[in-house]
Amino acid sequence: MKPRTTGSLTIDAFDARAVDIDTVGLEQLYTLSIGVGWPHRPEDWQFLRDMGHGIVVHDEIGRVLGSAMWFPHGTEFATVGMVITSPRLQTRGTAQWLMKRVLSACRGRDLRLNATRAARKLYLSLGFRTERTVFQRQGEARRSGEMPRPYERAELRRLDERDLPAVAELDAQAFGAWRLTLLAALLPQSVGFGLYRNGRLAAFALCRPFGRGHVVGPLVASNDEDAIIVIAPHIAAHEGEFLRVDTHIAEGEFSSFLARSGLAFFDTVTTMSLGGDFRDPNTRYGMQPVTFALASQALG
Ligand SMILES: CC(C)(COP(=O)(O)OP(=O)(O)OC[C@H]1O[C@@H](n2cnc3c(N)ncnc32)[C@H](O)[C@@H]1OP(=O)(O)O)[C@@H](O)C(=O)NCCC(=O)NCCS
């Protein structure tokens, strides 16, 4: 397919062109993200392309030098992610140029993203405001004693496609936007556990292959106890293997449980938003469902 050129920019001594992300090879995207130390596999890029839109910058001989993506959820909201500039081109305005194009494609939508330290200044200059810290936790999973059991009249079970409406409803209450398309795509490639209480889904956790191993997310629950009940079987299933969780929550029983399960603090990013209200994920002691683990940094 002939790449569709959507603009051009003169960077240093050569011309770079922006094209639709679907027109370049997965291997090129993989090379770009590996170049900045990100763990995404070609399959992870493919999934992101299936779920959203994006642009890449390439040079005259087709080398991909930068990327930016956005993932619409419903008609009024999107997450932004996979903003990368290849190291030899950094600090020359490429990411800012890409982001301006993303903002124009997303006009009218509230936006949320998870910013690395290197990117925070860029997003602040574009009007994003800082919301919360995301803690990337990962390591070799280990069982930490007894498997927590649900209380009476609660049932923990494997999720299948029949649970999708309940999963999407609970996720929307926690996340603040309806993500049915994303969840419908995540469910078949994930193992999911749901905690049902009096016939209603009270908490769930999905876990899928990603990067260096597996990632747990999204995980939605209304309190730490329920969050632990739905994540514990994933930790047991991946004992001795690489497991990752991206969470806003750094204290309390859930956080201690992750520490006992081998998932150490690895890095942090900052959730930022442009427009709209952000649901505070720290208000987790009431009845309100909360996102305990993100689907991914790009997808929120
Ligand atoms: C973050 C990243 C995308 C920035 O790309 P870039 O092309 O260098 O960014 P730009 O040249 O457009 O710079 C945008 C702003 O950020 C600033 N900036 C760029 N790199 C920076 C760094 N390492 N530390 C602090 N500020 C930085 C620039 O000075 C510029 O600020 P200004 O507008 O006030 O002049 C790039 O460094 C990168 O790919 N890093 C690794 C992957 C990553 O962290 N991606 C962000 C995901 S949220």
Image (cartoon, rainbow, N blue to C red):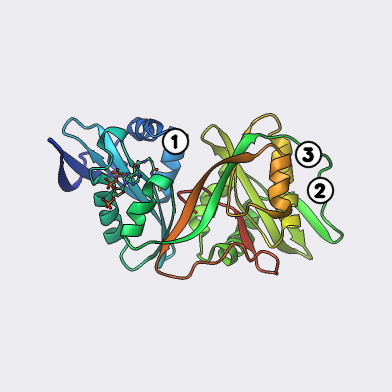
Left or right position of 62 against 37: left
Q: Are marks 3 and 2 in contact (CB under 8 Å)?
A: no
Label 1 neighbour load within 10 Å: few <14, some 14-19, many 20+: some
Left or right position of 197 against 269: right
First in sequence: mark 1 vs mark 3:
1
Circle number at residue 38: 1
Q: Looking at the picture, which amino acid does disc 3 mark?
A: Ser
Which residue matches tag 2? 148
Q: Nearer the viewer, residue 117 or 143?
A: 117
Q: Residue 18 location, x and y as percent?
A: 22, 45
Q: Residue at x 52, y 58 (%)?
A: 132
Does residue 10 appear in the picture of this structure? yes
Distance from disc 2 to disc 1, alpha carbons, whole Å, reads 33 Å
Left or right position of 282 against 78: right
Q: Residue at x 65, y 39 (%)?
A: 263
Q: Quadrant of residue 91?
A: top left
Label 2 neighbour load within 10 Å: few <14, some 14-19, many 20+: some
Q: Residue 126 location, x and y as percent?
A: 31, 60
Circle number at residue 22: none
Is the CB atom of the residue marked by disc 1 within 8 angstroms of ligand 1's nearest atom?
yes
Q: Where does the N terminus fall, quadrant-wise? A: top left
Which residue matches tag 3? 144
Q: Quadrant of residue 221?
A: bottom right
Q: Helix or strand or loop: what does disc 2 sit on?
A: loop
Q: Looking at the picture, which amino acid does disc 1 mark?
A: Trp
Ligand 1, seen in the image, is in the quarter at top left
Q: Are marks 2 and 1 in contact (CB under 8 Å)?
A: no
